[in-house]
Image (cartoon, rainbow, N blue to C red):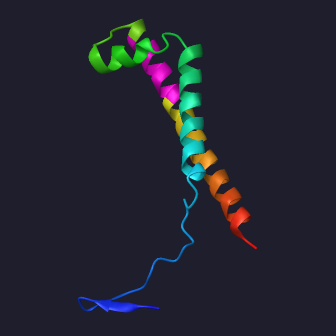
C-alpha cells in the first residue's frame, strides 16, 4: 500500500525495524555503562580521571594515567556496546520469526 504526498510516492513503515523492542537498546547501553564503570573502578586513577581530563590540565604521570584509564574504559565500553547490540538484534529477530 502506497500513497502520493506532495508528488512523492511514499510507502508505509514496514514493521521490521532493528530496535522494535525496548530491551534491544536498553540492555546494550546498560552493559556498556557497566563495563565503563568496571574499568574505571579497577584502573588508577579511577573516576578522578574524568575530572582531571575534562576540568583540569594534568601533566606528567597523572596525565598519562588519566588518558590510559579513560581510553581503556571508553574503547572497551564501545566494543561491548556494539557486540551487545548486535546480539540483542539477532535475539530479537529470532524471537519474532515464526
Residue nearer the viewer, 56 or 61: 56
In this picture, is 91 found above or below 16? above
Q: Report the magenta residues as a range.
A: 63-73
Residue 79: x, y in percent? 58, 40
Residue 58: x, y in percent? 32, 11
- Left/right placement of residue 94 relative to residue 59 reads right
Please identify the residue farthest to the right as the structure is shown.
98
Give the residue at x 63% y 46%.
Answer: 84
In this picture, is 29 found above or below 47? below
Number of marks: 0
Give the residue at x 54% y 49%.
Answer: 25
- Left/right placement of residue 98 relative to residue 51 reads right
Please identify the residue farthest to the left as the structure is shown.
6
Give the residue at x 60% y 36%.
Answer: 31
Residue nearer the viewer, 72 or 85: 85
Is 21 magenta? The answer is: no
Q: Main secondary structure of the magenta part?
A: helix
Give the residue at x 59% y 22%.
Answer: 38
Residue nearer the viewer, 88 or 56: 88
In this picture, is 25 found above or below 17? above
Residue 61, by quadrant, is: top left
Q: In the rendered image, which quarter contains the C terminus? A: bottom right
Residue 21, by quadrant, is: bottom right
Residue 1: x, y in percent? 47, 91
Residue 53: x, y in percent? 34, 19
In this picture, is 3 found above or below 47? below
- Left/right placement of residue 74 relative to residue 57 reads right
Amino acid at each position: 500500500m502506497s500513497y502520493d504526498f506532495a508528488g512523492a510516492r511514499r510507502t508505509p513503515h514496514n514493521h521490521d525495524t532493528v530496535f522494535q523492542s525496548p530491551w534491544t537498546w536498553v540492555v546494550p547501553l546498560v552493559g556498556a555503562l557497566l563495563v565503563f564503570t568496571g574499568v574505571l573502578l579497577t584502573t588508577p586513577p579511577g573516576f578522578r580521571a574524568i575530572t582531571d581530563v575534562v576540568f583540569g590540565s594534568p601533566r606528567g604521570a597523572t596525565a598519562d594515567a588519566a588518558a590510559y584509564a579513560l581510553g581503556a574504559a571508553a574503547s572497551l565500553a564501545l566494543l561491548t556496546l556494539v557486540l551487545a547490540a548486535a546480539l540483542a538484534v539477532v535475539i530479537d529477530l529470532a524471537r519474532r520469526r515464526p
